Amino acid sequence: MKILCVIPSRIRSTRLPRKALLPIQGKPMVQWTYENAARCKLLSDLIVATDDEEIANVITRIGGKVQMTDPDIPTGSERVAAVASQYPEMDIVINLQGDEPFIQPVMLEHLVAPYLAGETPEMTTLATPLDMTNSYHEHGAVKVITDLNHHAIYFSRSPIPHFRASTTAPVYHHMGLYAFRRDFLMLYQSLPQTPLETAESLEQLRVIEHGYKIRVCLTGKKTLEINTQEEYERAQEFVYVE
């Protein structure tokens, strides 16, 4: 099985300007993401998809592969699809966001585990158990709830589900990693954006709204994803431990 991992990385981040190039413990964020992904032995190829020459230069300086993409591509997965369209020999395509500098190879293994087991889901994503005390009401923590077969029912920045009684139900903290069957990724990029996708600003909702399924794969712990100044400051002291 051939697995392509694409890291979409753009310079025009909104919450944290020029995020991909911000130094973390002496290295640009996108370099951390690339080098940690490169340690996953399952990958057949690893490419950074970017619209910025500075980002491209960071990766080429360390011997990595880069593909320049249209700056007007609206979402990360569509940027990944633009690259994957040129690799018809690939079976599975991973979308690894560039703001996951501390990604661990085992997490990518969990993401593609259904495919390696002989299953053929259209798409998979990664999640961890949600910290209900600290993250349930946190806007920055994307929650996902699933059906009994671990397919996503809904993703939201809001607290879901609403607990009317003193009961429990599994709620997961979504991580922004996706794996696609390549043929489905080619279809995904042609699907029009959807109302819930736009409302939540979560591109994966497009898949559910168009009637397709996303398998949610669980991993033991969450990495430190960098979206805010506070998270960026925490990253300076973060200890990478597998």
Image (cartoon, rainbow, N blue to C red):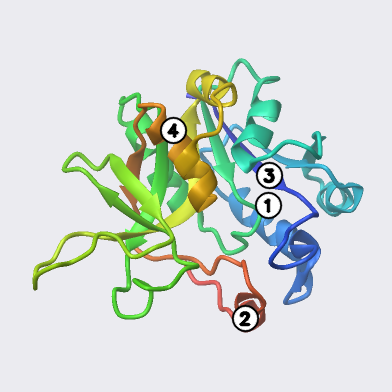
Q: Nearer the viewer, mark 4 or mark 2?
A: 4
Circle number at residue 72: none
Residue at the (33%, 47%) spot, across then down: 154
- Binning the other alpha carbons within 10 Å of mark 3 as few (below 14), some (14 to 19) or many (20 upward) gives many
Element under disc 3: strand
For marks 4 and 1 on the same chain, the one whose residue lies earlier in the sequence: 1
- Binning the other alpha carbons within 10 Å of mark 1 as few (below 14), some (14 to 19) or many (20 upward) gives many
C-alpha gap between disc 1 and disc 3: 11 Å
For marks 3 and 4 on the same chain, the one whose residue lies earlier in the sequence: 3
Task: Look at the image and tell me whether residue 204 can be seen.
Answer: no
- Residue 34 at x, y percent in the picture: 68, 52
C-alpha gap between disc 2 and disc 3: 23 Å
Q: Amino acid at mark 3?
A: Pro
Whether 135 is drawn above or below 104: the answer is below
C-alpha gap between disc 4 and disc 2: 31 Å
**Mark 4 and mark 3 in contact (Cβ < 8 Å)?**
no
Element under disc 1: helix
For marks 2 and 3 on the same chain, the one whose residue lies earlier in the sequence: 3
For marks 1 and 3 on the same chain, the one whose residue lies earlier in the sequence: 3
Image quarter for residue 130? bottom left
Circle number at residue 207: 4
Q: Nearer the viewer, mark 4 or mark 1?
A: 4
Q: Nearer the viewer, mark 2 or mark 1?
A: 2
Element under disc 2: helix
Q: Amino acid at mark 1?
A: Tyr
Residue at the (73%, 58%) spot, across then down: 13
Residue under label 2, please give it. Answer: 230
